[in-house]
């Protein structure tokens, strides 16, 4: 990679990064330190170690690469760019450095340059699977499906059991509306990697949309792989909700609330289920909580308004329907409700 290209990349990132100012919250909870502070301390400690190592070995490209990753994690794009460019100059044939440079460009929302950076890396390492998959992912984002499939095809031709390649191939098929093909690709990904979380999630979501009970099994596999997965547990509960197995759905939602009492989507869905079960007062209590936890949650105001309307509290209902439109001006159900009430 030429020094001019390196300097160009550095200037682009430096220019945008310098415009971004860090903000500090005024909240100062007592007791234990916030998780963000713990993470910052960990990054600082690791950076100090790397600084000492680099001082002793200034020509070690890998150390600069490691430090660049830490700076990126810390959202210091300028220092990350500086280090990755040093790493690329010291070892211009390492594909990992091009991928990191591409990630930096994505962080300043320059997908075009990020793609170009990956292609530069592939000129040096044309059969590097990670670079090609990374490129395919970006091409998928900009909806260049043919380009994505071409790169994934090259990976699969050279590595027939590459689970990630099949996963992204499945995403391409899904985005194109080819559900059957997507399922086949996601299943191949799980065949070659039984712990491929993202593929199990996709299979669970697709089968859930098809009202197929096997969705629960796929989502359970995702939970097996990541026991802390909120999205997999939520998807399971929502599947039961869609199947009108309300008690099972509420049971799973309650488990989620034990982990996070302020999960607005879970609180809303429990309220929605209670409304379907004619527990209007209890439903309204849940929507009250949602509006406190997430003050801009338009659907919560609509459902609370609906509860008030059923309970004969017309003025309260009108107020909530109007508030719904403040946060979502095209909320048709709220508009219809106001017309129904003569407003």
Image: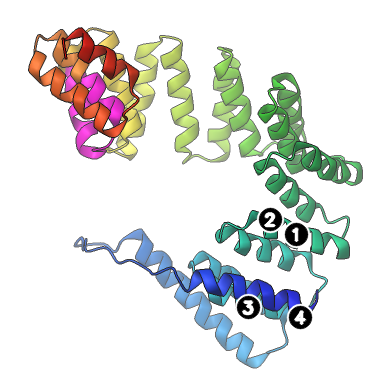
Q: Is 284 covered by the magenta stretch?
A: yes
Q: CA distance from mark 1 to mark 3?
A: 20 Å
* Label 3 secondary element: helix
Report the front residue among 106 and 72. 106
- Residue 51 is situated, as x and y percent measured from the top left of the image, at 56, 85
- Residue 10 is situated, as x and y percent measured from the top left of the image, at 63, 75
Q: CA distance from mark 1 to mark 4?
A: 16 Å
State which region is magenta.
Answer: 282-304
Q: CA distance from mark 2 to mark 1?
A: 6 Å
Residue lying at 75% horizontally and 37% vertically, measured from the top left: 145
Give the quadrant of residue 190.
top right
- Residue 169 is situated, as x and y percent measured from the top left of the image, at 75, 35
> Badge 3: how crowded within 10 Å, few (<14), some, or many (20+)?
many
Colouring scheme applied when the structure was drawn: rainbow
Give the quadrant of residue 317.
top left
Report the front residue among 18 and 180. 18
In the rendered structure, find residue 112 and report the number of the disc placed on it: 2
Give the labeled residue for mark 3: 83
Give the labeled residue for mark 4: 3
Residue lying at 39% horizontally and 69% vertically, measured from the top left: 21
Give the labeled residue for mark 1: 116
Point out the frontmost of discs 1 and 3.
1
Q: Of marks 1 and 4, which one's residue comes earlier in the chain?
A: 4
> Badge 2: how crowded within 10 Å, few (<14), some, or many (20+)?
some
Q: Are marks 1 and 3 in contact (CB under 8 Å)?
A: no
* Label 4 secondary element: helix
> Badge 1: how crowded within 10 Å, few (<14), some, or many (20+)?
some
Left or right: 80, with 252 as reference point: right
């Amino acid at each position: 990679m030429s020094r001019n290209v390196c300097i160009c990349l550095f200037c682009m990132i430096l220019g945008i990064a310098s415009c971004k100012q860090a903000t500090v919250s005024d909240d100062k909870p007592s007791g234990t330190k916030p998780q963000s502070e713990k993470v910052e301390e960990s990054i600082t400690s690791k950076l100090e170690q790397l600084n000492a190592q680099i001082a002793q070995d200034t020509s070690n490209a890998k150390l600069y690469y490691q430090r660049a990753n830490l700076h990126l994690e810390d959202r210091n794009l300028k220092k990350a760019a500086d280090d990755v460019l040093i790493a690329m100059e010291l070892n211009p044939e390492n594909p990992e450095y091009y991928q990191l440079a591409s990630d930096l460009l994505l962080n300043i929302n320059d997908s075009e340059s990020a793609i170009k950076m990956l292609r530069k890396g592939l000129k040096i390492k044309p059969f590097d699977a990670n670079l090609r998959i990374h490129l395919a992912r970006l091409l998928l984002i900009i909806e260049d499906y043919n380009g994505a499939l071409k790169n994934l095809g090259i990976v699969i031709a050279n590595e027939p059991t590459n689970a990630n390649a099949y996963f992204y191939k499945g995403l391409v098929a899904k985005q194109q509306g080819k559900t059957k093909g997507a399922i086949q690709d996601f299943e191949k990904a799980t065949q070659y990697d039984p712990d491929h979380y993202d593929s199990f999630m996709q299979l669970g979501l697709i089968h859930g949309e098809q009202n197929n009970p096997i969705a629960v099994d796929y989502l359970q596999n995702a939970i097996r792989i990541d026991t802390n997965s909120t999205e997999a547990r939520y998807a399971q509960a929502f599947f039961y909700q869609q199947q009108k197995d309300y008690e099972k759905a509420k049971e799973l939602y309650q488990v989620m609330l034990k982990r996070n009492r302020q999960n607005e989507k879970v609180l809303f869905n429990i309220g929605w289920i209670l409304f379907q079960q004619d527990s209007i007062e209890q439903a309204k209590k849940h929507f009250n909580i949602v509006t406190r936890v997430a003050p801009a949650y338009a659907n919560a105001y609509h459902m609370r308004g609906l509860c008030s309307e059923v309970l004969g509290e017309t003025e309260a209902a009108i107020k909530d329907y109007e508030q719904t439109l403040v946060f979502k001006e095209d909320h048709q159900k709220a508009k219809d409700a106001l017309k129904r009430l003569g407003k």
